[in-house]
Amino acid sequence: GENVEQHPSTLSVQEGDSAVIKCTYSDSASNYFPWYKQELGKRPQLIIDIRSNVGEKKDQRIAVTLNKTAKHFSLHITETQPEDSAVYFCAASPPPEDSGNTPLVFGKGTRLSVIA
Amino acid sequence: ETGVTQTPRHLVMGMTNKKSLKCEQHLGHNAMYWYKQSAKKPLELMFVYSLEERVENNSVPSRFSPECPNSSHLFLHLHTLQPEDSALYLCASSHDISYEQYFGPGTRLTVT
C-alpha cells in the first residue's frame, strides 16, 4: 500500500522568509496530493491540492510542486506570517478508479513556527 | 465550518464507563472516517466507512466499536478504555474514498 514520508517534523522560520515542506510517496499510481493545515485547537483544513497531470499549482502565497518521476511533492509558503504557524499534513491517494477502498494516506505532519 | 459536526466536543470518562461519540456530515458524502490524534501519532486512521459498509479497520482494539447507521452519521462507541486512549478523536467525510476529506472539530477525550 501507499506510504507517505514527510520532512521536516518541525520547522522554524523568521517572519517574511519562505518555508518548504517535503513529502515522498511510494505508490506510483497515486495521482492526488492534498495539503492540510491544522492550527492549534482546530480541525485540519485543506489548503491546496494538486493532481498528477500538473507539475505546479499556486494560490497566493502558497504553492505545491510535484515530481512524479522522483515521487515527491512539496509545499512552499512565501512571505511567511505568524498566522501561518500550524501543523501541516501532506497526503497521497491513488485514483478513485484504481483505489478500490484505499483512502488518503497522510504524512506525520510538520509543525511550522513563524517567528515575528 | 458546519459541514461536519461532532458531539460532544469534550468528554471525560472513567475506565469502566461506556460512552459514544457522534459525527454528522451535511455534505452528501459517501465515505466517513474516524481518526485518533495524539502527540505520538498525529493522524492515526481508525475506521473507514463507504456507503455505510466498513472498509478498513486498522488493528483497532475492540474497546472501540464504530457504527454507521446511514451515510450521514457515524458513531464511535467506547467501553473499558485505558488512560492511553486519551486523545483528540476526529471524524472526517469525503465524496468517495480517495477524495479530499473534510474534518469535524474533534472530540477531546480524557480517560481517568
Image (tube, coloured by chain):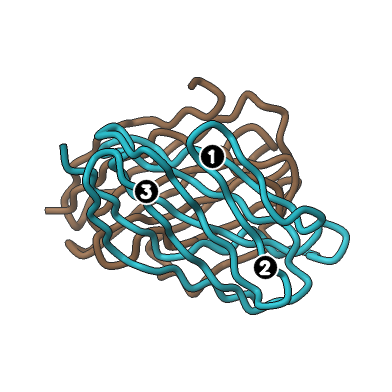
Contact, mark 1 vs mark 2 (Cβ under 8 Å): no
Assign a secondary structure to mark 2: strand
Q: Are marks 1 and 3 on the same chain?
A: yes
The residue singled out by tag 3 in the image is A18
The residue singled out by tag 1 in the image is A46
Q: Is residue B81 above or below residue A35?
A: below
Q: Amino acid at mark 1?
A: Leu
Shade representing chain A: cyan
Which marked residue is nearer to the observer: mark 2 or mark 3?
3
Give the side of residue B19 with respect to residue A36, left or right.
left
The residue singled out by tag 2 in the image is A67
Q: Residue at x 34, y 55 (%)?
A: B37
Residue sitting nearer the eye, A105 or A80: A80
Distance from Cα at disc 1 to Cα at disc 2: 21 Å
The crowd level at tag 3 (other Cα within 10 Å; few <14, some 14-19, many 20+) is: some
- Please state the chain letter of the residue tagged with numbered disc 1 in the rendered image: A
Shade representing chain B: brown
Q: Are marks 1 and 2 on the same chain?
A: yes
Which marked residue is nearer to the observer: mark 1 or mark 2?
2
Residue sitting nearer the eye, B41 or B47: B41
Badge 1 or badge 2: first in the primary sequence? 1
Give the side of residue B52 with respect to residue B62, left or right.
right
Give the side of residue A56 with respect to residue B58, left or right.
right
Badge 2 or badge 3: first in the primary sequence? 3
- Please state the chain letter of the residue tagged with numbered disc 2 in the rendered image: A
Q: Position of residue A46 (x, y in %)?
A: 54, 39
